[in-house]
Image (cartoon, rainbow, N blue to C red):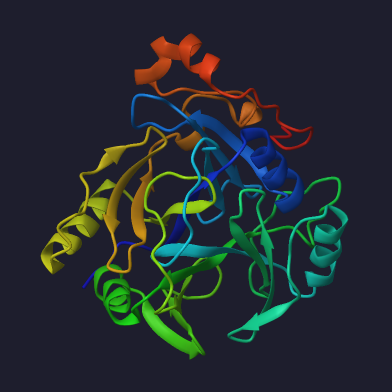
Amino acid sequence: MNYAATGYHHITACAGGAQEDVNFFTGIVGQRLAKQTVLMDGRFPHYHLYYSNASIEPGSIMTTFPYSRLAGKRGSGQVQSITYAVSRGSLPFWHEHFKKHKVNHGAAEERFGQRFIRFNHPAGLSFEVMEDKDDARVGWTTAEIGQSESVRGFHGTVLSVRDVSEQEKFLTEAIGFRKTGVDGAYHRFEIGSGGANKTLTLLHEPDRAPGSWTFGAGTVHHLALWVADDDALATQKAIYEELGYTDASEIKDRFYFHSMYVRSPGGILVECCCNVPGGFEKDEKASELGTKLHLPPWFEDRRKEILATLEPIAAPAGSTSRN
């Protein structure tokens, strides 16, 4: 079967306060603020903020819905942790960086022979920095985080599931991952060449209560895989339907990309998406990326109303384009 997905495109989580979210990803993680826009569904827009590496590459794009008015319930059937790739030997820097900024974090651990440190977002979201000697992507840099320590993009995700078998079947038969290892309760799957940006790990937690699926601060809403174009997106939708995953959504216009969603057997919401011509530069110049709020055309006539409902945010110096 000719599968469409090639790796990650973005991962979307629900945060708490908008400014604390911006400060966390630009100051603590060291990503660039690539786009300020809003959630494109529903009657009441919320921020949709995008962070990335230096080149805004698919597989580096972390997005958030600051959603402070409602807390989510963490549990199985969710992305438990999001893993960034960093250079080999950089974990001591990250340990001191988290300590300096009083970020809740753990000691260095190892999974499938790779060392990582887990740390927390202010809303309770779990992240990791994992050493990967082969990842040559270019990270964003800050006054505190140099290129040699910077996050390159995603290494992968850790998904909590109560049952491995059905989620494994979905990953291998519907998307094209292959199982490449088991390390205790962790089951590793890789796509394409494997490694950074092409790894997904299931954590078997049979007794963990399910988490919430709705928007709510402190939970990951979905992970998104990258496909080449609209034809590949349609092909992936056809694969889902052929295999009986009939809750696959229609293809949706997200202005900067096109998307299609399916709820996987383990509970995790999986999106497939492809970029549209122009991408994030459809509505602002490269030199202005991330500097101000952009609305999709169908919300533009409500700009004054929408701005009145959103918490004002400021992009820290050096967090957006430097052109």
* Residue 3 vs residue 244, the one in the foreground: 244
| Residue 127 visible within the image | yes
| Residue 228 visible within the image | no
Give the residue displayed 56% in from the left and 40% down from the top: 50
Left or right, residue 26 beside residue 202:
right
Left or right, residue 267 beside residue 132:
left
Q: Report which quarter residue 132 is drawn in.
A: bottom right
Q: Is residue 267 above or below residue 168?
A: above
Q: Report which quarter residue 312 is drawn in.
A: top right
Give the residue displayed 21% in from the left and 52% down from the top: 234
Quadrant of the image containing the N terminus: bottom left
Q: Report which quarter residue 3 is drawn in.
A: bottom left
In percent of width and height, residue 218 lies at 54, 51
Q: Is residue 120 above or below residue 135?
A: above
* Residue 25 vs residue 192, the one in the foreground: 25
In percent of width and height, residue 262 lies at 27, 56
In percent of width and height, residue 263 lies at 28, 58
Give the residue displayed 48% in from the left and 75% down from the top: 194
